[in-house]
Each structure stands twice: as C-alpha cells, then as structure tokens.
Image (tube, helix red, strand yellow):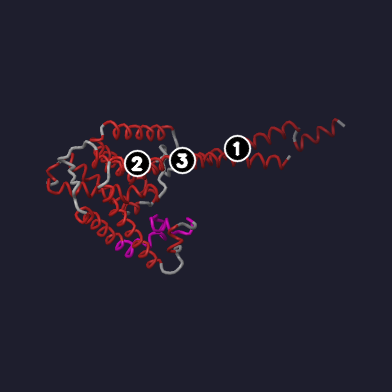
Amino acid sequence: MEHVSAAYESIVGSPLQYERKTYLDGLQEAKRSVTKQENALTNTHTVPFNKYKVFFGFMKSYVTTYIFGHCPHEFPAWYALQMLVLVPVQAYRWAKLKWLIFFTEFCWISNVTLALYCIALHARPALVPPEFRTTMTHFFFAVAAGPLQAAVIALGNALVPHSVDHMMSLLIHLQPAMTAYCLRWLDVDRELFPVDPSVDFQTYALPPVIFLLVWALFHSAFFLIWGLDLGEKGYATTFHYNLGASKGNNMFTSVLGKLGDGSDRIRFIRYECFSVVCNALTLCSTFLLFQSSIQIHFCVLGAVCVISAYNGASWYACRFTKFSKELDRLIADAKKDE
C-alpha cells in the first residue's frame, strides 16, 4: 500500500505540494490584478505611476492655492510660469503618442495666447501699448471665465494630482478662470491689467468673438484639408476622439452621429459650427459676470472648483472600487473550484 501511495505522489505530487501550488497561483493572479489596477491608476502614458508624481502634483496644488489666497497680484505670473514650463513637457509626451493635434483646439490656442500675453507684460511691458491693455484684460476675462471655465464642467475635468494629463487639463481650464477672478476683483497691477467697469457689451464682446471666428476659420481649413485623414494614420484628434465608435454614445454622437455613418466632412462642419456657437454664447455671457460682484463671481468659481474636486474623488473611487471588484471576482472563482 505504501508503494502505491509513493508511486501516486511521484506522478501527481503530494497533497501539500498541490496545496502550495494552488496558493502560489492565487498569489500570482492577485499580483496581476494589482498590477492591472496600478496601471489604471497611472493614467499617464509615457510616465509610470510613482511617488514623485504624487508629490509634485500635491505641491503644485498647494502652491497654487497659497498664491491665489495670499498674493493674488502674482497669480497671472504664476499661471504663465506653469504654462512656460509644463507645455513643452506635454508637447514632448504628446509627440510620442501622436496627440500633438490636440494643441490646435481652442482651449490650447487660447491658453498659449493668454500665457504669452502675461509673459510679455511682465518681461517687456513696452511691447503692449497702454491703450490696448484694457481691451486685453477684458479679452482675458471673457475667454477664461467663459469657454475655459465652462469646459471644466463640460469635459469633467478632475483634480487628480498624480496625473499629468488631468493636471494639465485643470491648468488650461481652471487656472485661467482663477486668474480672471484676480484680474477683475483683486489687487493686481492696474497699469498692466486695467479694467473698465462701465464698458458696453459690444466693446467687451467683439474682440474675443473675432478671435474665436479667426481660430475657427484656420482650424476648419486645417481639418478639411488634412486633419480628417489623420485618424486613419494613428493620430488622435478631438473630433475623432469625441465621435469615434470606441467612445460609445455621448452628446456629440447623439446629435451628429458616429464617424463612418455618412459624410465625415459634413459631420465635421456641423461639429465645428456647434462648437463655435457654444463658445460664442459662453463668451458673451461673461459680460453679466464681469458686471456682477465679487461675491457672485466667487460663488461661481468656487462651484467650479468643488466640481473638479468631486470629479477627482470620483476618479479615485472608481479605480479603487474596480480593484475591490477584481479581488471579489478572484475569490468567487476560487470558491467555484473548491
């Protein structure tokens, strides 16, 4: 009998060895699940998740909050400095990912314009004649408190400090809005950023609307001539991202349909017109905010900040919930095999 038992164990292994092998397999499967969720937590293509990204993201958030509350007169310079340093980093990352076409969008063009204006004012004020500065301050307010601030809500921007992409989205959408608040109501250098509270609607709204239309003209021409074919070459664009089949149904596909269903050129023209109309209406509506009060503007800006923080909390909760569900699945599968 002992000879039979020894022969059996030599073929299939002892019960203890079988147990250890099963336990090791479980650990390895759990490790793969942890790695999978860690990769999902990374959410930054080219830069892996690490403590330095988390540290830098939180420190930048703390510094931004401190400058906004303690020395708002320096906030335009802080916003411009971040753009000066971080946009080349983003360009380097996006070049590797074939995402550079995103820089042609209105949000990015507006931010580069506003940041360069702030840099010029602080570095060489003589480059901007004093008679144009009031118009430019109003232009800054309309663009930043309008389409850029609205995009935080419309695009679901989230405060995710460790993610380069999320923090850059907040930088180009929320921080210009915070800068606009400082320029309109707080103690900034009025020689550089003068305002005219009695400005009429046409004088206020015409420059940013013209800027929007000029951008739309060049943006549309670029896409109708070259851009619509870039998706097939592996390049990412906002148009392909929002209307692609992989995105499922959203507000764009519900109105315009998905790519490939009919003429994409006609779909792009409708998409562009929809975008321009929405941005133009948002630009014009900021005149009411400009003419309101610091209390009303603070409540609007505070609500947008709260929404971005809630979106960030939801982002983290979603990832950790997925991790728990993955472990629950492993446990359920193990119980089935018992």
| Residue shown at 25% from the left, 57% from the top | 209
- The image shows residue 256 at horizontal and vertical percentages of 42, 63
| Residue 298 inside the magenta-drawn segment | no
| Residue shown at 46% from the left, 39% from the top | 313
Distance Cα–Cα, label 1 vs label 2: 46 Å
Label annotation for residue 295: none
- Residue pointed to by mark 1: 30
- The image shows residue 50 at horizontal and vertical percentages of 44, 34
Label annotation for residue 42: 3
Distance Cα–Cα, label 3 vs label 1: 18 Å
In the rendered image of this protein, does residue 256 appear above or below residue 286? below
- The image shows residue 159 at horizontal and vertical percentages of 41, 40
- Which residues, given as a range, are shown in magenta? 220-247
Q: Sequence-wise, which precedes: disc 3 or disc 2?
A: 3
Q: What is the secondary structure assignment of the residue under circle 1?
A: helix
| Quarter of the view holding residue 244 | bottom left
| Quarter of the view holding residue 46 | top left
